[in-house]
Image (cartoon, helix red, strand yellow):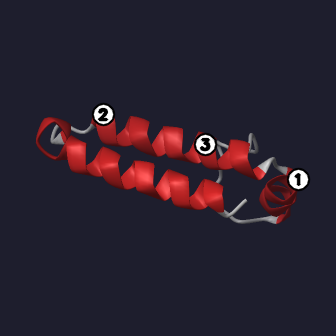
């Protein structure tokens, strides 16, 4: 919801679905993945596991963008 710019309430309601349907999919994927990477980088275990996490998020980003 945050990446879509709608009210963050944790519910998949009509406004969220409408925003998702109207969104530029590639832009939305990038925004979601940027947030995911930011969250992972904020974890105290990032120095230990971060390289693998970033490798997997990069692969997921590439896969998702390849679908649009």
Characterize the local packing of mark 2: few (<14), some (14-19) or many (20 or more) Cα atoms within 10 angstroms.
Answer: few
**Is residue 10 in sight in this rendering?**
no
The mark that comes first in sequence, 1 or 2, is 1
Task: Determine the CA span between mark 3 and mark 1.
Answer: 16 Å
* Dot in front, 3 or 2: 3
| Disc assigned to residue 22 | 1
Q: How many numbered circles does the render carry?
A: 3
Q: Residues within 10 Å of mark 1 (few under 14, many from 20)?
A: few
Q: Position of residue 13 (x, y in %)?
A: 78, 65
The quadrant in which residue 21 appears is bottom right
Establish if 52 lies above or below 31.
Answer: below
Q: Which mark is residue 42?
A: 2
Query: In this image, 46 relative to 15: left or right?
Result: left
Residue 4 occupies quadrant? top right
The C terminus lies in quadrant: bottom right
Q: Do the residues bearing badges 3 and 1 touch, measured as CB atoms within 8 Å?
A: no
Q: Nearer the viewer, mark 3 or mark 1?
A: 3
Residue at 22% across / 43% down in the picture?
51
Residue at 50% x, 40% y: name it. 35
Q: Which residue is mark 3?
A: 30
Q: Earlier in the sequence, mark 3 or mark 1?
A: 1
Q: Earlier in the sequence, mark 3 or mark 2?
A: 3
């Amino acid at each position: 919801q945050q990446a879509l710019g709608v009210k963050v309430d944790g519910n998949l309601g009509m406004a969220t679905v409408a925003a998702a349907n109207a969104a530029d999919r590639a832009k939305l994927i990038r925004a979601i993945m940027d947030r995911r990477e930011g969250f992972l980088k904020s974890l105290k275990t990032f120095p230990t596991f971060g390289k693998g996490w970033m490798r997997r998020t990069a692969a997921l980003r590439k896969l998702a963008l390849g679908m649009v």
